[in-house]
Amino acid sequence: MAYTSANQLELLQTAEAVAREKNIEPGLVVEAMEESLARAAKSRYGAEMDIRVSIDRQTGDPALGPRG
């Protein structure tokens, strides 16, 4: 059984709320969140790092790893 924290669910709830407010697809909001988190990670760990962030659309679980 997978454990999902409140913070992870809040990511998805925030994406849904923004999507409704802006009348856009929630997936676009999640993609923007992923890109933003990847930029923040590059800023923290170095621009030469090619970091990819993926947010699970069911659980809100973010995963960071090398782009590829």
Image (cartoon, helix red, strand yellow):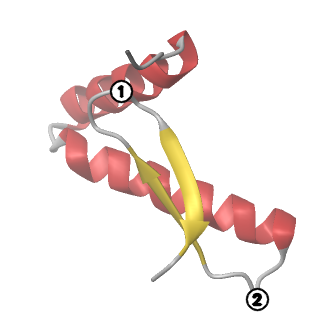
Q: Is residue 32 above or below residue 42?
A: above
Look at discs 2 and 1 and give the one toward the viewer: 1
* Furthest residue in direction top, as rendered: 6
Q: Residue at x 22, y 47 (%)?
A: 27
Q: Which mark is residue 48?
A: 2
Q: Seen in the image, is 24 located left or right of residue 64?
A: left
Tell me the quarter of the picture where residue 15 sits: top left
Q: Residue at x 26, y 52 (%)?
A: 28
Q: Are marks 2 and 1 in contact (CB under 8 Å)?
A: no
Q: Nearer the viewer, residue 57 or 33?
A: 57
Which secondary structure lies at badge 2? loop
Q: Quadrant of the C terminus?
A: bottom left
Marks 2 and 1, the one that precedes in the sequence = 2
Q: Quadrant of the N terminus?
A: top left
Q: Is residue 18 above or below residue 6?
A: below
Q: Residue at x 15, y 37 (%)?
A: 23
Q: Residues within 10 Å of mark 1 (few under 14, many from 20)?
A: some
Q: Position of residue 38 (x, y in %)?
A: 60, 63
Q: Amino acid at mark 2?
A: Glu
* Furthest residue in direction front, as rendered: 1
Q: Amino acid at mark 1?
A: Thr
Q: Residue at x 43, y 18 (%)?
A: 9
* Furthest residue in direction bottom, as rendered: 48
To which residue does mark 1 refer? 59
Q: Seen in the image, is 23 located left or right of residue 67?
A: left
Which secondary structure lies at badge 1? loop
Q: Nearer the viewer, residue 10 or 3?
A: 3
Q: Position of residue 20 (x, y in %)?
A: 20, 27
Tell me the quarter of the picture where residue 59 sits: top left
